[in-house]
Image (cartoon, coloured by chain):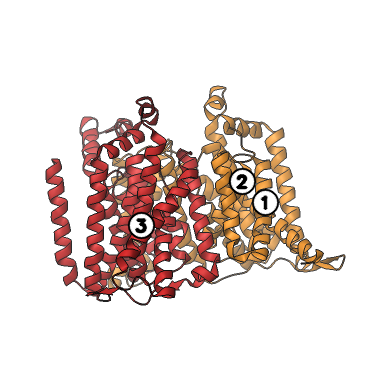
Amino acid sequence: MTQTMKIVSVAAVLVVLAVIVPHSSSFVVLLTTRAMCFAILAMSVDLLLGFTGLSSMGQAAYFGVGAYLTAILAAKFHFGLGWDFWLVVLMGMAIGAALAALFGLFAIRASGVYFLMITLALGQCVWGLAYRWNSLTGGDNGINVTNRPNFGLDLTNERTFFFLVFAFFAASLILLYILVRSPFGRSLEGIRERELRMQILGYNTWLHKYIAFIIAGAFGGLAGVLWAHTNGLISPETVVLTTSVDSLLMVVLGGAGTLVGAAIGSGIVFALREYLSTLVPWWQYALGGVYVLTILYLPTGLMGFPARLRQIRGASTKNPSKSGDAKKLASAPS
Amino acid sequence: MNTQFWVIQAFNGVSYGALLFLVGSGLSLIFGVMRIVNLSHGAYFLWGGYIALSVIAATGSWALSIPVAALAVALIGIAMERLFLRSEGFEYLRNGVIGLGLGVMVALAVTAAWPHFIGGGWAQFGAVTVVAAIAAYFALSRISLVPIDNDVLRQVLLTVGFAFLFQQGALDIWGGNNMDITPPAVLSRSVVIGGIYFPAYRIFMIALAVAIGAVLWLVMERTRMGAAVRATVDDAQMARGVGIDTNRVSMFVFALGAFLAAIGGVTGGAFLGIYPGLDFEMLPLAFAVVIIGGMGSLGGAAIGALAVGLADNFGKALFPEVSYFTLYAPMVLILAIKPTGLFGRE
């Protein structure tokens, strides 16, 4: 498929989504809205993981500050419930970016498993504050955001709100797509593939990674702002380690290095977490199973599924009796 | 804020540190040897506590529950390490386990979708499971899994997946209530020293951690296996080069880590309680221990556990609003300045 074809098909899917979902039941509308908030978060993780090669385990931190900022402003100061909502969006992105700028100073130095650990620790710092700083965050009980903004558009209407989140989701997808296709995005991919070579070529890889980290933080903050109004309750559960890990899984499940994959992944994880859990009590087996099977058998994610299928087919037609060959083929870079 | 306050807080901090040492030392060794960030370590802790509860319910013996729970969880750890964290060997068993898991899922799904078909009967449920499991087994044996050995992120996410599975498993087996492990009456008393009451159980906790720490130290310093573990922590490739079977070392360490975490679960269950969600509460604390102390270092884990235990207790007592922050912020600083931890070796 050519690049244009891909863009056209993604645009078509988006249009279909925007047309069909508002006519579904309110549960589906709500679920899609929630999934799209997380899709923005997952795409921000993908910018780091899929394009820069940094596996951040603390993305919930930026999501959390964005959400808490919105919730505190709305609940305590009644700010951001009219036209000033757009200001809150900007502030949420700014605070996410600022926090990432601060955290990046510590984290970007590290690489591999140490980067993972340090972002985990940074995420836990934010969780600790959210959990304990009662006077600001309401501690364990969290903060209730009772009113959604109303600026001509009444966002208390689930369907209107869906369109708002959809617009933000589509805009984030487009912006991030432009970013990763830009020369800057290309050099990020170069860093992912081989950092040393990029350094030798004269790129300031630290700065590239730092900027990518900040941009990811800004989109994390945006996702948090939307989440605060979607969920209505912001508690330490929002910033907990599981949120960060889930957003990583969404990316890996959909296919790291493809923004659309991150969005698909968040859709699936949300379907499991929030739809399946209403049907059966054992939904967590399905979630855990999806983790295990994706990791073991589909490391390139769903977007890499066609390629993987060809790989398996090719391996079995060449030499159906030996699984050793298939393993070699599977481990070779595709 | 008199002397008594400081003494009691310090004592509580040290005894909490003793518990954290049990959880953190295993995690630290696993990381040091295998470079795996094991996020299912909290689940080992939780399962240790739950299995002990079952043993106590069945036999009434608290003393027996510690070794039984620890050994059972060590076996779970070995199975996880052998079957899933390495891609070499045990292909039939791995496919069998995954196939069985998928079979159970299919049977559960069928039960949920068409309740009248299975009708709650175990025979029908079992039949559906077996048929689906066999189909899944043959499907899986045609697909080879993609080697995971050197991919940090995939290893982490795999252990997260298992943490979720263990969590749901515990919920299904033992229910969602908060349970308590009651230690024997001897340990439920208090010892009075200088007018201050010290719970005997917390003294026992400290003694146990010291004893286990001493045994671990002897094993690491004085035995062949210990030397192999230390060599693998320092440089796994070189260790393989001089003929150390790092494969066996990593199995040993994973079993040991799970064993220690389970002991922590049994003993800690007496004052923390055992409840769903405890696993993901202990996990970040265990990571704080590992990072402050240094990955793969036993002495480091001891000091890290003591530091985290004290910081946690004094933090909560003195400045409750930022108490967790004061715990994790030093962790960040240490990672930024010396990524291998205070006592870890490069």
Quadrant the C terminus of chain A occupies: top left
Q: Residue furthest right?
A: B194
Compared across the picture, whether B191 is left or right of A44 comes to right
- In the displayed structure, A272 sits above or below A308; it is below
Q: Colour of chain A?
A: red
Chain letter for mark 3: A
Near-viewer residue (A19 or B64): A19
Chain letter for mark 1: B
Q: Are marks 1 and 2 on the same chain?
A: yes
Quadrant the N terminus of chain A occupies: top left
User: What mark, if any, has residue B292 been given in the picture?
Assistant: 2
Element type at marker 2?
Answer: helix
Distance, label 2 to label 3, CA atoms, is 32 Å
Compared across the picture, whether B295 is left or right of A329 comes to right
Q: Which residue is mark 3?
A: A93
Residue located at (39% from left, 68% from top): A281
User: What mark, if any, has residue B307 been given in the picture?
Assistant: 1
Residue type highlighted by circle 1: Ala
Residue type highlighted by circle 2: Ile
User: What mark, if any, has residue A41 been given in the picture?
Assistant: none
Q: Is residue B176 visible?
A: no
Q: Is residue A281 visible?
A: yes
Q: Residues within 10 Å of mark 2 (few under 14, many from 20)?
A: many
Residues marked 1 and 2 touching at CB (< 8 Å)? yes
Residue located at (35% from left, 49% from top): A215
Report the chain shown in orange: B
